[in-house]
Amino acid sequence: MGQWVYTFGDGKAEGDASQRDLLGGKGANLAEMSSLGLPVPPGMTITTEVCTYYYENGETYPPELEGEVDAALEQIAASTDRKFGDPDMPLLVSVRSGARISMPGMMDTVLNLGLNDTTVPALAKNADDERFAYDSYRRFIQMYGDVVLGVPMRLFDEHLESMKDEKDVELDTDLSAADWRTLIESYKALVQKETGSPFPQDPRDQLWGAIGAVFGSWRNDRAVTYRRLQGIPERWGTAVTVQAMVFGNMGETSATGVAFTRNPSNGENALYGEFLINAQGEDVVAGIRTPQDITEKARLEAGSEKQSMEKALPEAFAEFKAVCDKLEGHYRDVQDLEFTIERNKLWMLQTRTGKRTAKAALKIAVDMVDEGVISEAEAVQRIEPASLDQLLHPTIDPQAKTDLFAKALPASPGAAAGEIVFSSEEAERIAGLGRTCILCRIETSPEDISGMHAAAGIFTTRGGMTSHAAVVARGMGKPCVSGAGNVRINYANGTMIAGGRTLKVGDKITIDGATGEVLMGEVPMLNPELSGDFQRIMQWADGARRMRVRTNADTPHDARAAREFGAEGIGLCRTEHMFFDPARINAMREMILADDTEGRKAALDKLLPMQREDFTSIFEIMAGLPVTIRLLDPPLHEFIPHGEDEILEVAEALGVSPDKLRNRSRELSEFNPMLGHRGCRLAVSYPEIAEMQSRAIFEAAVAAAKKTGAPVEPEVMVPLVSLKTELDFVKKRIDATAKAVREETGVDFHYQVGTMVELPRAAINAKAIAESAEFFSFGTNDLTQTTFGISRDDAGVFLGAYLRESIIDIDPFVSIDVDGVGALVELAAERGRQTRPDIKLGICGEHGGDPASISFCESVDLDYVSCSPFRVPIARLAAAQAALRKKG
Ligand code: PEP
Ligand code: MG
């Protein structure tokens, strides 16, 4: 086996930034910073391969690991002149997790490891600060107790709170060394009581306990949920970084902070961050004290009274500023940094590519092109396609009358309105009922991840812009307002109070994540306008992409929205959605209830003008761009009422007996609706439906061409074909209808007939089917369910377990299963082209809006992807990135 442990420090390192997969993001970048000669406390990274080994071998370690860890510890000891457990110069370390991509707050961290009853006096002596040493020890017992020994943090907090009550102080910083000593004794007693054993005193036991806890935390519930939501595979594993401690809590010349080299919220090219004097590690992100600004400029803008780091610690600030410039220049991208200042000496603890809002990402990419740092192609590749979704969020209508409840930090952009809920469970429940809610918390923790996902927006009363709530909300693209110190939330009463007003659970509020305002009631909103930066990136993207981007649109309204987002045609118009309109469904039902062809035709005659009108406006809106209209697809029972009340109501409206309706409903019911009497099978049973729809399409094409003066060339698409003979049967009717419409109107027009490829048989027999089909559109929703033999309606029930157990990495209905469904797509494309080299190939399943699937489509040379209107910009960008990647 290879190497399990990599060391860094003292201006050198065994790994570098390219080894994220092995060392995790944190470990790889610490190695890189160390090699760049930046001030990094020495340490070691235990690789992600150890994590994989650990889970594959019954939670045990590779036999060589212990030796490698010992050797690395020696090296750290030598470079710091300290030793593990030494009563004079004890080495203290931090133990942190670090996956390939960052999972903020998802896994566990232990600081101050190595402290025990013997080393704590040495720390006090070396630091010449007793209070600091005992504070560090009690923090260690608390963190280690929680993370490694499983003693709930709440119990430690209770002890701490009662100590503060007893001493009648408000802040932790008001407690003395003697107070901490007393608290340490009660913490130790707590550990003994909860675990049945004393708190471990041997630093080596402490270390192995912490390493085990970090590996164990890879599979804790919140990490598992986070990975599921972010599509991160289970098998990646986490690395563990063990690093010499430096202290931000050694008095007024010490501090700890986090910063971004540019503003992650709006992209402004200005150092941006927060810090706390005399604080340790997690205090800033935990949101327990509200932090101070790093630069004087930011402080003035925020109107804060608290000193900036620039003023409070000018030398450390100057060095930090230089490090920021160096790192941004080195990585050629915005960096997100963690640092500690120990008695005026700067130490870098982390750097990584800064997460940013979509708005900031666009501005930063465009600015960096203008600054000559990156090329236009790189700028296009820098934008996460899915993040564009954030730009499509609504904002508060400036004309709206608003009533301000409170104002706090604008932590994540976009506005959202909904019912107040105070817990994640409640957020999930309300969302499950189809209602929108705002999750209101004092602060959020990683346990809240599902609730944050379910809520429309997040509001917290504690914590800064880098608090858990803010970071996670920005990642999710959810509006968030944080740190509203003047609002008091009372979970027990279900209330929140500000300025003498009380809101209760269920009351409606609106939050504006761009201004930090919390408004009473549901405030009117405006749809977003896309900025100049957006237009420039999209222009570069459009220049780089090969595939066209169409939209799935069933109504003129959707078609119009999609064109505004840059759709270049319609890839799928599902005609059945037009029939579900309440004004039309009864005509559809009459057709279904008709006893014979004549009766059906009479009902279809009523539907014809409605369909024609829809198609005419769609053709007009798409002004000569290609439009694929699919003939009726779903099983007919979907249109029939099922409940008894509804049967009576519909029977009366249609003037038929309830029995007739009941009987037809029974006849049509199927156990396997998605495999049943649907798609072209309907057209085979009832050709008159296909004839009516084709007539509506052709008449609309004639009408629209007359109105706009531009020729319309409709693409008529036959769904769920598996046999060439099925397609031929329907095509014959379509062609005959076209001929009739040409004769009746005296207008000549072009059209194409093609098919969905959404059944494995169609993919395999694509060569024959292409003899009749002028285009294929891959219906990967149905193709996924029929290839796997799972139903798209209920697969969610068990796919969760498949993801959890790493049987699959990602839901195949979300991102195309390249090896199976993708192989069929590739095969069909190849075989279709053998028969008809210029056959038009596109995709219209949900995958058409998924960046990874779009990349696959590029690899098999499809001509276009088609997706819902709001995903069109995402698809344009993803298609450009795929083309650029292919070019290399
Ligand atoms: C498909 O099956 O991928 C498709 C686009 O059709 P529908 O979702 O309407 O079945
Ligand atoms: Mg389908």
Image (spheres, rainbow, N blue to C red):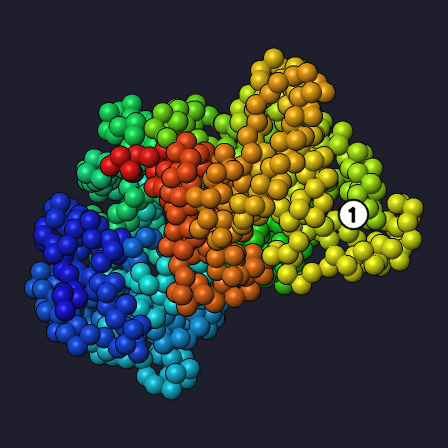
Q: From this viewpoint, is residue 8 visible?
A: yes
Q: From this viewpoint, is residue 383 visible?
A: no
Name which residue lies at 65% across and 36% down. 733
Residue 830 placement, left or right of 448: left
For the view shown, which residue lies furthest in the bottom direction? Answer: 196
x and y percent of residue 340 in the render?
25, 51
Q: Quadrant of residue 4?
A: bottom left
**Residue 781, above or below 46:** above
For the view shown, which residue lies furthest in the top direction? Answer: 709
Name which residue lies at 49% across and 53% down. 761
Q: Nearer the viewer, residue 98 or 255?
A: 98
x and y percent of residue 534 in the render?
43, 28
Q: Nearer the viewer, residue 282 or 856?
A: 856
Q: Nearer the viewer, residue 380 or 90?
A: 380
Residue at mark 1: C-beta within 8 A of ligand 1: no
Q: Quadrant of the C terminus?
A: top left
Q: Quadrant of the N terminus?
A: bottom left
**Residue 498, above or below 614:** below
SS at badge 1: helix
Circle 1: residue type: Ile
Q: Nearer the viewer, residue 250 or 830?
A: 830
Label 1, residues with CA under 10 Å away: few <14, some 14-19, many ≥20: many
Q: Quadrant of residue 245?
A: bottom left
Quickly name the residue at label 1: 592
Name which residue lies at 47% across and 39% down. 770
Name which residue lies at 45% across and 33% down. 840
**Residue 640, above or below 736:** below
x and y percent of residue 78 in the render?
7, 64
